[in-house]
Each structure stands twice: as structure tokens, then as C-alpha cells.
């Protein structure tokens, strides 16, 4: 079976290696990008193509892609970690179709930033889902789906790695089934679908009136490889990468203290305690050049 592989993030690279090294499928073409300012976890697949003598395309637009594909023969498209919708005319060039990936339990939670939203919303599970691509977004028949548990301590990178480990096993299995002709796709129930929207910088701003748990979830959701949550102090934005929820009684903090007030500063640990809507958190990892002073406010 001949595979055309499309992707441009670390996840793409790991699955490309898996297909190349652990299946009998032949990768006959790779589509990727040399550079990207869009993907926080960007990784070009072009060096892999060069190293393994596989034809490749540095993607510019779908018209260029369509023209390049006209000279290539392949049975199926694997499109994993790609921020562009493949048009139907390109999907139809593959005899077996095009398979995409979405880290959620489709048909629920289609759309943008699924790892970030799952953590920010405090979900206890998500999914690793491969599906046949169609003209919609994340709406095609399911090829393979595995539930993935989200632990309270999981960061974005933790969940990213969990999903990647599960996806590697899935791609080996369904590639084998595709080659044997035994794959049985499962149609999605579109009545159960919802779509997560694109996030903006404002979504990463910590509102100290939020609950401690909501702030904790937001911070871990936007931790590496993503852009980081942020707050405002003295008219400047500062990234916050890690926080912990603390007991108010331990620091003798009363509920009548306003959210955003700095309660205590630990110079030796380079951390500080902040009042939230319902409790306190300790800011453990951040990009403050100078720690705020006790009694000051973050907004």
C-alpha cells in the first residue's frame, strides 16, 4: 500500500517514523513545510524525506499541492497534524481515501485546539481518533478511536505525549487492516457533535476572579508546547507556566481578600501566593523579571 503523508508538527513526525519503520506500507510522498509561525509544536518533515530519499513538497497552497500530486501514485493519504483543510478534489485522488486525526472523542469536541480546551475545561477524559476525511471538519467515518484518561496533574505536554503514544499503536493496527482490506469504519452520530472555537490571546489571560481550579486548569492547558497563560502587572503581560492550589488556612488568608492580591512572596523559591475567586494559588513558574510585592495586585 502506497501512502502520501502530510503533516508539520512533532506529532506528525512521530507517526511518520512509526509508519515508515513499523508497518509494511510504502511512503511514496511527503508534504510538509520548511517553516511555520503558526504551530507551537512545529516540526518539518522535509529532512526526514531527504534522509530517506522520499519525494517531498514544501507546501505553499492547495493549488500547488494539487499540481504536484498529479505526478504521484498513492493509495491513501495520511494527514496528521495539519492546520489546513484538504479540499475534496485532493481527498478523492486517493483510492482508499484520506485519513485525518483529531485528539478528542469524536463526534464530540470537533474543531480547534482540542488538547488545550480539554485541559482548560477540566475534562477527565479525551480521545485519540483517526477518521476518514470528507468536506467537513472532523466529521468523517471513524477509523480508530481510543479513550485517554486525563489526570489532574497532566500538563499540555503530558497529554500530548499520552495521545502520541496511543496514536502510534493505532496507526500500526489500522494500517495493517487497510492493507488486508478488513478495516470497518464507523459513521459518526452528527447529532452528538459540538465544535470548539479558535482560541485568542484573551482566552489565555488569567482572571483572578476565577476559581483556583479554573486558573490551575488554564495554566496547565497553555503550558509547553503552547504559548502559556498570562496576567497583567504594572501594565505589562507576564507568562505563567505552573501554579499549585494551596490551603488558605495554611497562610491565614480570609475569604474577604480581593482576587488578584499578592498575599505572600517567597524570594528564595522565586514564587508568590495570589488570592483567587475562591481561594489561593502559588505561582511556581513564570516570567516575572521582578517578583510583585506583598499587597500589590495582579490584573
Image: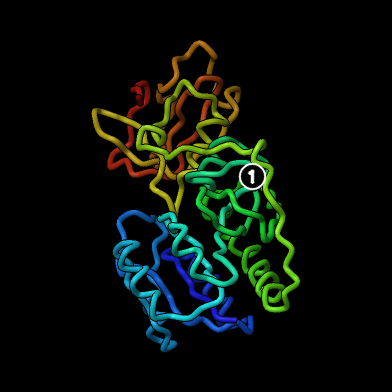
Image quadrant occupied by the N terminus: bottom right
Image quadrant occupied by the C terminus: top left
Q: Residue at x 72, y 68 (%)?
A: 183
Q: Residue at x 39, y 80 (%)?
A: 71
Instruction: Decide: is 248 above or below 256.
Output: below
Q: How many marks?
A: 1
81, 26: nearer the viewer: 26
Residue at the extreme bottom:
53
Horizontal and vertical percent for residue 78?
A: 53, 68
160, 30: nearer the viewer: 30
Answer yes or no: is residue 268 visible. Answer: no
Q: Residue at x 58, y 48 (%)?
A: 139
Colour mapping: rainbow
Residue at the extreme left:
235
Secondary element at image label 1:
loop
Question: Dot 1 surroundings within 10 Å: few (below 14), some, or many (20 or more)?
Answer: many
Horizontal and vertical percent for residue 120?
A: 53, 37
Answer yes or no: is residue 283 visible. Answer: yes
Horizontal and vertical percent for residue 290?
A: 28, 39
Horizontal and vertical percent for residue 83?
A: 42, 55
Instruction: Decide: is 16 above or below 133.
Output: below
71, 138: nearer the viewer: 71
Instruction: Decide: is 65 above or below 179.
Output: above
**Residue identified by numbered label 1:** 107
Q: Residue at x 35, y 26 (%)?
A: 298
Instruction: Decide: is 164 above or below 206.
Output: below
Q: Quadrant of residue 99?
A: bottom right
Amino acid at each position: 500500500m502506497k501512502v502520501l503523508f502530510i503533516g508539520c508538527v512533532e506529532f506528525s513526525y512521530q507517526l511518520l517514523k512509526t509508519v515508515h519503520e513499523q508497518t509494511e506500507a510504502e511512503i511514496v510522498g511527503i508534504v510538509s513545510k520548511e517553516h511555520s509561525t503558526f504551530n507551537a509544536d512545529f516540526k518539518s518533515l522535509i529532512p526526514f524525506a531527504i534522509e530517506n530519499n522520499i519525494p517531498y513538497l514544501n507546501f505553499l497552497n492547495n493549488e500547488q499541492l494539487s499540481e504536484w500530486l498529479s505526478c504521484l501514485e498513492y493509495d491513501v493519504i495520511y494527514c496528521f497534524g495539519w492546520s489546513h483543510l484538504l479540499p475534496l478534489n485532493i481527498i478523492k485522488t486517493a483510492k482508499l481515501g484520506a485519513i485525518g486525526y483529531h485528539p478528542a472523542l469524536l463526534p464530540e469536541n470537533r474543531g480547534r485546539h482540542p488538547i488545550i480546551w480539554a485541559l482548560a475545561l477540566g475534562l477527565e477524559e479525551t480521545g485519540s481518533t483517526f477518521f476518514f476525511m470528507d468536506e467537513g471538519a472532523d466529521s468523517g467515518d471513524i477509523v480508530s478511536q481510543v479513550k485517554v484518561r486525563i489526570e489532574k496533574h497532566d500538563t499540555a505536554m503530558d497529554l500530548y505525549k499520552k495521545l502520541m503514544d496511543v496514536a502510534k499503536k493505532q496507526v500500526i493496527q489500522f494500517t495493517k487492516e487497510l492493507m488486508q482490506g478488513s478495516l470497518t469504519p464507523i459513521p459518526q452520530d452528527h447529532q452528538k457533535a459540538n465544535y470548539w472555537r479558535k482560541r485568542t490571546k484573551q482566552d489565555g489571560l488569567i482572571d483572578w476572579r476565577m476559581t483556583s481550579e479554573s486558573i490551575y486548569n488554564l495554566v496547565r492547558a497553555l503550558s509547553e508546547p503552547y504559548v502559556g497563560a498570562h496576567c497583567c502587572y504594572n501594565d505589562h503581560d507576564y507568562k505563567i507556566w505552573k501554579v499549585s492550589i494551596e490551603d488558605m488556612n495554611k497562610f491565614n488568608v480570609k475569604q474577604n481578600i480581593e482576587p488578584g492580591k499578592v498575599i505572600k512572596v517567597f524570594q528564595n523559591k522565586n514564587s508568590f501566593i495570589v488570592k483567587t475567586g475562591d481561594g489561593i494559588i502559588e505561582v511556581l513558574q513564570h516570567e516575572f523579571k521582578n517578583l510583585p510585592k506583598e499587597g500589590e495586585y495582579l490584573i
